[in-house]
Amino acid sequence: MAKKERTKKLSSNGKKVLVLCCMVALLVVTGVLNFVLNAQIKDKDDNLVNGGTPSDGTAVETFFSSHRSNRETARAEEFSYLDAIISSESTSESVKASAQDKQVELLTFIEKELVLESLIKAKGFEDAVVTMSTNNLNVIVKQAELTKEEVAQILGTILQETDYVAGQVYVVPYTA
């Protein structure tokens, strides 16, 4: 009997307090990690500003990787919104169908962007980021300058692989 008396169940309020304490602890850990990582990034940025450009091209690599990351994040948000529209019971069937069509369009854009980036790299360019929308296609190439022949080579690849016309395609060199 003595053992049963010692083991008390947490009350509803006790459980809420325990969950709240855990959440506060996680918030503190997140804040500390954010502070530490931001300090490291700031130190790297200060070194770039004070010491010139990095010799290994990390600023350029950071641009291309952050651009891809931002593009993926924006697309994930779009899919999330479209999923919410589709799963909502108050949404009409025509709106749901439109949202599903938009999801298919986004998936097509994602697939084409990856293919085009790979094809541009296969043409000898070090890196490229392609962003598609219904009205235009943007290409950012990792190269300080592009000759007319290089632009024509990239444009030819894009026109061959997509339904865009030349006036809808923008090819831009990336200059750090």
Image (cartoon, grey):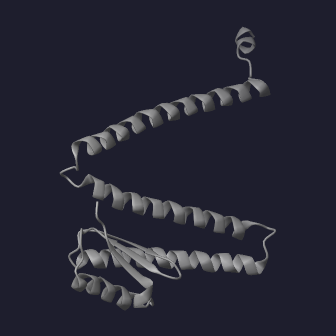
Q: Is residue 160 left or right of residue 19?
A: left
Q: Which residue is most to the right?
A: 90
Q: Quadrant of residue 103?
A: bottom right
Q: Which residue is most to the left?
A: 55
Q: Nearer the viewer, residue 106 or 154?
A: 154
Which quadrant is the N terminus positioned in?
A: top right
Name the spot of residue 19 as percent of width and height, x first.
Answer: 67, 31
Q: Residue at point 65% right, 64% down? A: 81
Name the spot of residue 157 as percent of width and height, x first.
Answer: 32, 86
Q: Nearer the viewer, residue 141 or 73?
A: 141
Count the numbered circles shown: 0
Q: Residue at point 76% right, 66% down? A: 88
Q: Nearer the viewer, residue 85 or 175?
A: 175
Which quadrant is the C terminus positioned in?
A: bottom left
Q: Quadrant of residue 95?
A: bottom right
Q: Is residue 31 left or right of residue 1?
A: left
Name the spot of residue 14 as percent of width and height, x first.
Answer: 74, 24
